[in-house]
Amino acid sequence: MADSKRLTARKAGQKRSRAKSSTPKSKADKRAAKPRSKASKSSTKLRTKASAKTAKSRAKVSAKPTKSPTKASAKSAKSRTKVSARSTKSPTKSTKSRAKGSAKSAGSPAKVVKDSTRRSNASDLAKQHRDISVSEFFAKNRHLLGFDNPSKALLTTVKEGVDNSLDACEEAGIIPDIRVSISQISETRFRVIIEDNGPGILRAQVPKVFGSLLYGSKFHRLRQSRGQQGIGISAAGMYGLLTTGKPIIITTRTGRKKDAHHLELVIDTKLNAPKIKRDDVVEWDKQHGTRVEIELEGAYRGGQHSVDAYIRQISLANPHAEITYVPPKAEEHGAEHVFSRVTNDLPKETAEIKPHPYGVELGVLMQMFRDTAARNVRSCLQTDFSRVSAKTATEILKKANVPPTRRPGEVSRDQAESIHQAIQATKLMAPPMDCIAPIGEELIERALRSEVSAAFYASVSRRPAVYRGNPFLIEVGLAYGGDLPADQTVTAYRYANRVPLQYQQGACAITKAIAGTEWRNYQMQQPRGAMPVGPMLLMVHIASVWVPFTSESKEAIAHYPEIIKEIRLGLQECGRKVATHIRKQRREADAEKKRAYIVKYIPQVAIGLQQILSLNDGQRDKIVSNLTSTLEKSRKL
């Protein structure tokens, strides 16, 4: 009986110890005790005692937090709150982060570091976006247009005005008569006046022509002209406004019975729009023409890149024009210099052509399909491109696997790419050449003879060629000997559509072609990879519907292989001519040297014969005469 009571008491004690060990004090103890409750069902008496001791020790630790934040003891009683519970979710945190968590749980305030400068968000950035005017862009980047230094700015202003005058006169069928006047107002300020006898400009068009960038009549057509982009003269007026604050002054008249209009205007760079300051009807002695006056900051210098050199060079490429030049300082030829015209015949009128398929890129082709008025793709290829017949259009579409009756606006991108590839794989005729007006071999040589004192002249006009579907033609003129310096690098005049190119000579395809020609084969001296040396002047002209300039300032020609090849062939042809002349000169010099020796010793020969043959003086003189005449006959042979 007693034994049964003791057994019952022992079991009751075991149950109380199990209940005590399975009841945790906190959430952390519950998580720690949960797996132990499952294992305790099959545990022995010793494990039960150990779990009870562990529960007691944890209770002591929870009542008294430790000072050292170790991996096991950093969890204090206060750290078992919500803050410490969040921090204990990631058991891989460092000791430092747990110490910070303990400090926060102990009641220490958290320090938040804020950046003193507020960063912009998407809304703030969107408010800063706005359109950029073309005029505003070029006002800040005027070096792109050729106004990067004072002397170049003066030259560019004159060049743009003269180019416009020549283009206007030729299109109206008027032989150009142009006057360029430069007067110096102060040390760095000049007034440029360019006056022509062209057709004039309508009053309504004057503000747009001179007060708006990228406004012109030549950009969208494929025919030879000096201007291309509609920037030049308006950019010159903008530069004058920026440097002096003075407006551009225009006087124009379109006919004898029409009023002459006098306008003063400035360009609003933010809007790329003109602002008229003055608009009057005035008396003018010219029946038709235009007078442009611009005041600007500049510098007048001589040399290769001067205005004087430009006027001289443009008179060579435009022998049909008479140009009167008034420099700011009187020169040896007087207060003004007149470059007379060599011919009264205008260049032939050029025709506008349609783009050639070889020069059209994929994106442009897709745009043409969207904009065309043709009803189907085949008629679009025939009417919107040059040198594409009905048979050729059918062949292109057959290679591209595109139905000829498909509407151009329904052509997909993949189909357009197939058509573009088929065009490149189809043999097409070269574009028509009536859009180009070359100077001509005869006029080039006559112009060189009028301006350059030399011993030999030659000129070559190459056959028209094509680059990227654009027709072009190369002309080369050459002057050798005479007053040209023999110990200096040859002088090279570069032209594009009759306009001299005076800057960026090293970056130009013409210079590369000249330096790449083997001039030693043509009796000239030439350092390796450099320009030849000798008494020679070279004039190279490219005429094209679209000259590939390297920048908006139109100072150098891009290095297209087709262009460089044609320039080199023209130079070689002229080189063969000058080599023939040089060899002939050398033969004549050698013959003259031999003749001098013979003439020197003919009297001695006659004296020797007189002594041998006992001849009198008359017979001796006759021998001298006979030998001299024989020498002259041999020279003629």
Image (spheres, rainbow, N blue to C red):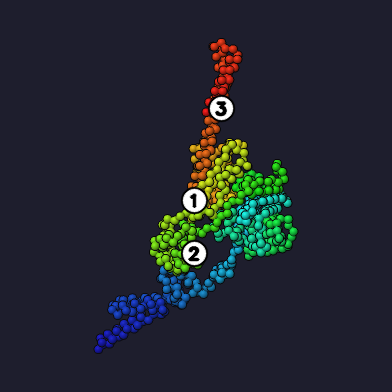
Relative height, residue 398 to residue 590 (above, below): below
Question: Please, what is the three-letter code of the amino acid marked with disc 2?
Answer: Met
Q: Quadrant of residue 333?
A: top right
Q: Residue type at mark 1?
A: Ala
Q: Residue furthest top?
A: 614
From the top left corner, tell me how far across and down residue 403 is, in percent: 40, 66
Residue at the disc numbered 3: 592
Q: Residue at x 61, y 61 (%)?
A: 215
**Residues at circles 1 and 3 in contact by the CB criterion of under 8 Å:** no
**First reached walking from the N terminus: tag 1 or tag 2:** 2
Q: Is residue 23 left or right of residue 217?
A: left
| Of labels 3 and 2, the one closer to you | 3
Q: Where is 97 relative to 355, above or below?
A: below
Determine whether the residue tagged by mark 1 lies in a helix, strand or loop: strand
Among all residues in the image, which is located at the extreme right?
A: 283
Label 1 or label 3, whichever comes before in sequence order:
1
Residue drawn at point x = 69 percent, y = 63 percent: 276
Residue at 42 percent across and 67 percent down: it is 405
Crowding near the residue tagged with mark 1, few <14, some 14–19, many ≥20 C-alpha atoms within 10 Å: some
Q: Please state, as top left, top right, bottom left or bottom right, where the N terminus lies in the image.
A: bottom left
Q: Is residue 176 left or right of residue 392?
A: right
Circle 3 sits in a helix, a strand or a loop, which is it?
Answer: helix
Which residue matches tag 1? 465
Residue 536: image location, x then y, percent: 57, 39
Res. 68 visible in picture: no
Along the viewing direction, whichever of 416 and 65 lies nearer the viewer? 416
The disc at residue 353 is none
Question: Mark 1 or mark 2: which is in front?
Answer: 1
User: Can residue 347 be seen by looking at this rendering?
Assistant: yes
**Secondary structure beneath disc 2?**
helix
